Amino acid sequence: MLPSMLRRNVSGSHRSNTGLGRAPSLPLGGNLMTGFTKRQVALLRVRDDNRCAWTGMESDRLIVQHRMGRGMGGSKRANRLSNGVLLDSLINGAIESDATLQAEAVRRGVKVSRYADPLLTPVLHAAHGWVLLDDDGGFTTVEEVAA
């Protein structure tokens, strides 16, 4: 049995609870560690065409990125479909650790302020262009957002 600080995912990689190491990919049934339900993860996969919102590429490393951070202890408000996009875990890690990429993620709407409403904040999605995401698993195309 694995030590409690290691979790094994479907692709065989490990993730330490300390935040070091590779983030797990989403098993087909979802990853409840994100706070999103299995049903929500399935809807995100359909909406995002099972592609990374940043690159548009399919990957076995896709994870759900909260556009607005969950904060300490999480928040039910954060687990809305408008607040989630699929990202390659390597992209997600780079965004979280590099200030320049973090600023680009904010410009693209992949990350939003805790005070913003993800329903009203457009995201530049590699598969769909500039869109407003809804909480039912859909999106509406919008005009290009000025930088």
Image: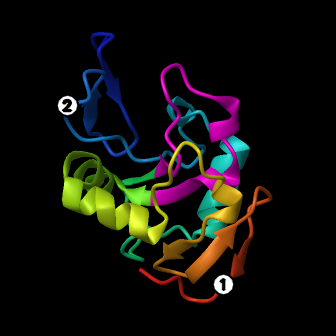
Residue on which the image places disc 1: 142
Q: Position of residue 143 (x, y in %)?
A: 62, 89
In the rendered structure, which segment of residues is drawn in magenta?
A: 64-86
State the CA–CA distance, disc 1 to disc 2. Answer: 37 Å
Q: Dot 1, how many residues are within 10 Å of its Cα: few (below 14), some (14-19), or many (20+)? A: few
- Residue 53 visible in the snapshot: no
Q: Which quadrant would residue 121 be assigned to in this image?
A: bottom right
Identify the secondary structure beneath mark 1: loop
Work out whether residue 76 or residue 64 is closer to the camera in this orientation and state it. 76
Q: Residue at x 36, y 74 (%)?
A: 55
Could you tell me if residue 5 is visible in this image? yes
Residue 60 x, y percent position in the rendering: 37, 58
Q: Nearer the viewer, residue 58 or 47?
A: 47
The residue at the point 30 percent across, 56 percent down is 102
Q: Is residue 107 magenta?
A: no
The residue indicated by pointer 2 is 20
Query: From what the image shows, is residue 144 above or below residue 43?
Result: below
Measured along the vertical axis of the image, is residue 143 above or below residue 138? Answer: below
Please tell me which of labels 1 and 2 falls first in the chain.
2
- Quadrant (top left, top right, bottom left, bottom right) of the C terminus: bottom left
